[in-house]
Image (spheres, rainbow, N blue to C red):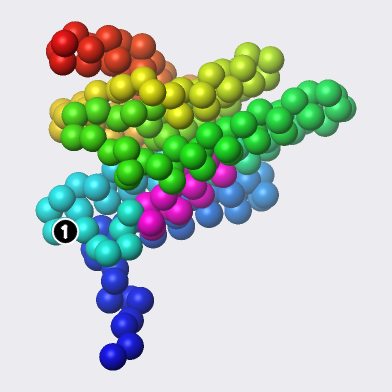
Amino acid sequence: MQKSMIKLLSIADLITILNAVFGFFAIIMLFSDHIRISFSLILLALLADGLDGIVARKTGKGKIGEYLEAMADMISLSIAPMIFVYKTYYETILSEISLHILLVVVFIIFLICSIIRLSSFHIMKEKKYFTGLPASVSTVFILILAFFKLEIVYILPFIVVISIAMISNIHFPKPGFKIDGTAAVLIILTLIMEKFFYSIAPLLLFTALALYTIVGPFYLRKNTS
């Protein structure tokens, strides 16, 4: 009897697909110069990325869920943020060929590390920690810095460091419900607050993730030693 591909999907998988759709439309919006909308759509993709895991734990995983998640995250957490950065700094690098080339090289590094990270995530998955910096954290870092237009000479080395951190052997703790909930609230506040790019919500989100990235590995080592 022939199997149906649709029947392989679970409820969580539908949310994962929504994640990819948000990422795709974020890219489309960039071509229309709607930077703010694109920023919001990538944040919505991040929320969908977190929600599909919660739903999967409650309702069960689909047979192709792990494959779908990697593909969706590649669009929304890797390709869309890189195009966002390119569009944000396009006028800056337009007349600087060397900067243009450097930006492309950095993008290639980030792309390669993202592919490795996302394709190996489920193989190396552990209950108590992530191996390497989570792609979602990297995305928020890059997205906020680009949206606030940090000087390109600073954001490029930052992207390289983030890329290497994603495929490193450093262990980062898995946040509990309270921390995940706080991050979700900050993302939602960033989305709904008028003139959110001037608000404190994205700065608080960036600060919280910076603390997680710096303190997290030491906290995990202290509590597992």
**Residue drawn at x 24%, y 28% as measured from the top left:** 129
In the foreground, 63 or 152? 63
Badge 1 amino acid: Gly
Q: In the rendered image of this protein, does residue 13 appear above or below residue 132?
A: below
**Residue drawn at x 40%, y 35% as measured from the top left:** 136
Instruction: Please indicate whether residue 8 sits to the left or right of residue 197 in the image.
Output: left
Q: Which residue is mark 1?
A: 60
Name of the residue lying farthest toward the bottom: 1
Q: Residues within 10 Å of mark 1 (few under 14, many from 20)?
A: some
Please provide percent x and percent y for residue 32. Answer: 66, 50
Please provide percent x and percent y for residue 173. Answer: 24, 23
Instruction: Please indicate whether residue 50 sits to the left or right of residue 144 in the image.
Output: left
**Residue drawn at x 67%, y 19% as measured from the top left:** 152
Looking at the magenta stretch, what is its main secondary structure?
helix
In the foreground, 5 or 93? 5
State which quadrant residue 14 falls in: bottom left
Please provide percent x and percent y for residue 196. Answer: 44, 29
Please provide percent x and percent y for residue 93. Answer: 79, 27
Instruction: Please indicate whether residue 104 sits to the left or right of residue 50 in the image.
Output: right
Q: Over which residues does the magenta segment extend?
A: 67-79
